[in-house]
Image (cartoon, rainbow, N blue to C red):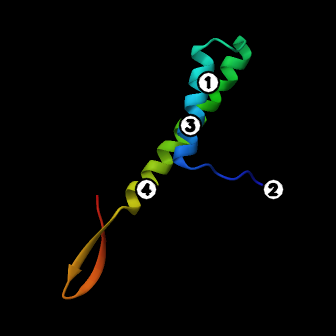
Amino acid sequence: MAAKKQSYEENIEEIDKILEKLENQELSLDESIAEYEKAIKLIKESEKLLEIGEGKVLKVLEKNGKLETEEVE
C-alpha cells in the first residue's frame, strides 16, 4: 500500500525537525546527508502543493443574485 501524502503543514513540521537535528549535530555525516536529501524532497513536494493551492484559490462574486466562482491569478 502506498504511503499517505502529507499535507503542506506536515511537510513543514517534518522539515523543521530535520533542521533541528542538523543544527544540533545529532547525526553522523551519512545520516546528515540522508536527512538533507529527505528535506529537499519535502521542500519540492511543498512547493508543488503551494502551486496547486494557488491554482485553486477562488474568488466568490455575487452577480445578479447568484454566487459565482472565478479563479484568481
Looking at the picture, which amino acid does disc 2 mark?
A: Met
Residue highlighted by disc 1: 36
Residue type highlighted by circle 4: Gly
* Disc 1 from disc 4: Cα separation: 25 Å
Q: Residue at x 62, y 24 (%)?
A: 36
Q: Which residue is mark 2?
A: 1
Q: Where's residue 53, x and y in %?
A: 43, 56
Q: Secondary structure at mark 3?
A: helix
Label 3 environment density (alpha carbons within 10 Å; few <14, some 14–19, many ≥20): few
Is residue 38 depicted above or below 48 in this figure? Answer: above
Q: Residue shown at 59%/31% (left/top)?
A: 39
- In three-dimensional space, the C-alpha distance between marks 1 and 3, rounded to whole angstroms, equals 15 Å
Mark 4 = which residue? 53
What's the CA distance linking mark 4 and mark 3?
A: 18 Å
Would residue 32 appear left or right of 42 to someone viewing this image? right
Q: Nearer the viewer, mark 3 or mark 2?
A: 3
Mark before the other along the chain sequence, 3 or 2: 2
Q: CA distance from mark 1 to mark 2?
A: 26 Å
At x 40%, y 62%, the residue is 56
The answer to which of marks 2 and 4 sits earlier in the sequence is 2
Q: Nearer the viewer, residue 65 or 33?
A: 65
Q: Which residue is mark 3?
A: 13
Residue 59 appears left or right of 11: left
Circle nearer the N terminus (1, 3): 3
Image location of residue 61, percent across then percent down: 24, 75
